[in-house]
Each structure stands twice: as C-alpha cells, then as structure tokens.
Image: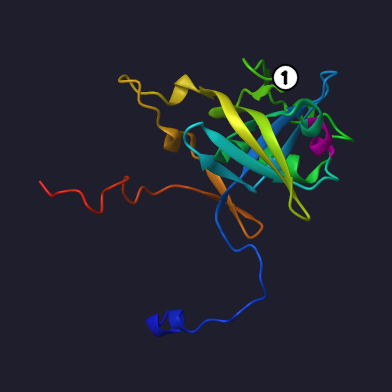
Amino acid sequence: MREDVFYHKQEWKPGNMLYPLPAVMVSVADKKGCDNIITVAWTGTVCTNPPMVYISIRPERYSYGMIAQTKEFVINLTTRKLAYATDYCGVKSGRDVDKFKSLGLTRQKASKVIPPLIGESPVNIECKVSQCVPLGSHHMFLAEVVAVHASQAYMDEAGKFHLEQAEPIVYSHGTYFALQDILGTFGYSVKKKK
C-alpha cells in the first residue's frame, strides 16, 4: 500500500472508534443467587488509587438488573480458548439459558462479592459498584476493585505473572483478535542502550 494513502481520510459521523477493546465476560448475580454472564467491550480502568474500573451496559440487558440490585460484578479476562464462550455470552440472553451450564464453565466462589468467578479465566476482578451513571444508550457502572485472582498456571518461578501465555483476546469492529507479538515493554522507548 502506498504511504501517501494514509494521509487521505474520510470524515465520518461521530461514533465509537476507540478500538481494539478488551472483550471481557462479566459474571453477575442477583440476591437470590441466580447468576449470569454478559460479554462487555465497553470496559476499562479509571483509577489506580483506589483501584477502579467501569463497565457500560444497556439497561434492557438481563444482567443490568442483577448489577443494579447487588451492586457487584466480576470482570473475567478472556483468552483464545474462551473466544467461543465470549461470543456466546454476548449474543445469548441469560433469560433463556444458563450460560455456565451450556458452555461447561466452572463457577468459582468469589471472596468479596456474590457473583461467581469464571474458573477458566486467567484473571478475575471482583468489583463493587460505587456509582451508576446514565449516559444514554448505556449506563456506566463505576466500581472499586475489591479483589483480584490470577491463575497460578501463568506464574513463573519468580512469581511474575505472564498473561500473554494465556493468549488474551480483544474486540474490534465486530471481530475478535488474538494478541501475539510483543512490540516492547513500558518505557522501552526511553530506555538507555547497554
């Protein structure tokens, strides 16, 4: 492709073009113990201290009511092996199917919240909602991270966690992608050469 083509751009109507995004499975539960999994791409980090994240969900989604009721959820990171489950949990409603059962996923007890962890996920982030912000089509749940669980399968002898070995996936314009190549580590652009 010719390099000068990159400088010729079309202007589009305003829209969400911040891609790729993490594709996560969010586990939720109501006060009676009924649970569900919803796939979310509108998610991210908002604060380090206290550790906070957000997820944005349409109010008509089945999981929305569960989060509104308990003010808790678990963000479960996804992998190449979980790609099918990630998609399934985004297109099937928990009103119609038990997603844990139909996908053969393992419910693990969380330490600080009611919703279960997804056992097959390499990282589970327990969250307690501090605020719900109605934004339009989606409402944003701002939440404090109250516990993090990392699979020992991806820890080396020194105790360093290697998420890349779990083959995490991302979502971009309706497509799931695997992350493969390491291009550098934080600060490599200014690191002194040996």
Q: Residue furthest left?
A: 194
- Residue 72 visible in the displayed image: yes
The front one of 52 and 163 is 52
Image quadrant in which you'd find residue 154: top left
65 within the magenta span: yes
Residue under numbered circle 1? 114
- Looking at the rendered structure, the kind of residue marked 1 is Ile
133 sits to left or right of 189: right
Considering only vertical position in the picture, is 157 above or below 174?
A: above
**Residue at the (52%, 81%) spot, across then down:** 9
User: Is label 1 in a helix, a strand or a loop?
Assistant: loop
Q: Main secondary structure of the magenta part?
A: helix
* Few, some or many residues within 10 Å of mark 1 (<14, 14–19, 20+): many
Q: Position of residue 139 (x, y in %)?
A: 75, 47
Describe residue 2's horizontal placement relative to residue 11 as left or right.
left
Q: Which residues are magenta?
A: 62-66
Which quarter of the picture shows residue 74? top right
Residue 83 visible in rendering: no
Is residue 72 magenta-colored? no
- Residue at 80% of width from left, 38% of height from top? 64
The image position of residue 26, as x and y in percent, is 68, 35
